[in-house]
Image (cartoon, helix red, strand yellow):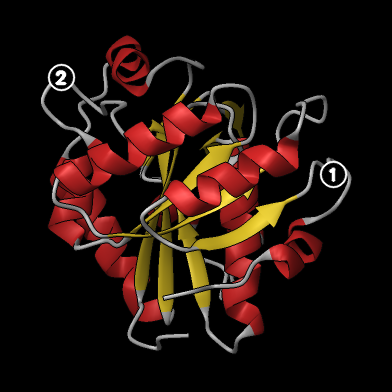
Amino acid sequence: MDRALDRLFVTGTDTGVGKTVASAALLHAFRARGLRAVGMKPVASGCTSTAAGWRNDDALALQAASDPLPPYDDLNPYALPAPLAPEIAARDAGVDVQLGVLVSAFDRLHPLADLVLVEGVGGWAAPLTATLDQRHLVQELRLPVLLVVGMRLGCINHARLSARAIQDDGARLVGWIANEVDPEMERRDENFALLSVRMPVPCWGRLPHAPDIDARQLSWHIAISL
């Protein structure tokens, strides 16, 4: 693996494709290679009120997969209560999501680890605010991008369009992961094979549909390729 890789942005072909599952597995995969790796979920909607403040399950999963353990407020600077699109959830909460706040949180996490993995929201084009897209954060932090493809009917189209959009926005797409989100999908192997020859970057792994397997075990299915 390229030791120069010190940051990574994980996006998906859509909501519900398993970005957090893949991100947690990736953190364990990097750690298995001797790297200190921490996760970050800059903006998370759908949070629970706790004694320590608002907490998001996806952000907590990234925190649990990290080593060293990052402070939650840096890992998830914007924890929005409503389980809605971030722009709507932030408006409902009276919160103004600022790029500078996200960059400052990343800058505090970066010295803690060899690699910071930043998980986005929804798909690549899902906005954070009326004027802030995820591509702006990727550009500001110079984040290479990995695409998680939810393997289900329509995934070939969604994956190719997402890859094209990422590259058209000037970001560096470095790989993709296939996540078996639909155990009933017909001819999964054929769909995976079709995607493998059409994606412009290497496949970093194919995660099985295994809800009871923890992130460390899922990391065995990942082969980081740069």
- Mark 1 — residue? 210
On screen, residue 127 above or below 169: above
Name the residue rendered at 49%, 60% in the picture.
39
**Residue mark closest to the camera, 1 vs 2:** 1
Q: CA distance from mark 1 to mark 2?
A: 37 Å
Q: Is residue 44 visible?
A: no
Closest to the observer, 166 or 123: 166
**Residue at left 56%, top 36%?**
56
Point out which mark residue 47 bears. none
173 relative position to 226: left or right? left
- Relative height, residue 163 to residue 17 (above, below): below
What residue is shown at x 20% (from left), y 33% (from top)? 133
Q: Residues within 10 Å of mark 1 (few under 14, many from 20)?
A: few
Quickly name the residue at label 2: 130
Name the amino acid type tagged 1: Ala
Position in image of residue 93 (x %, y %): 34, 16
Name the kind of residue labelled 2 in the image.
Answer: Ala
Q: Is residue 193 visible?
A: yes
Whether label 1 touches label 2, CB < 8 Å: no
Quarter location, residue 151: top right
Give SS at disc 1: loop
Residue 168 at x, y percent in the picture? 16, 43
**Residue shown at 64%/27% (left/top)?**
152
Q: Which quarter of the rendering shows the C terminus?
A: bottom left
Q: Position of residue 43 (x, y in %)?
A: 37, 37
Q: Looking at the image, is mark 1 or mark 2 earlier in the sequence?
A: 2
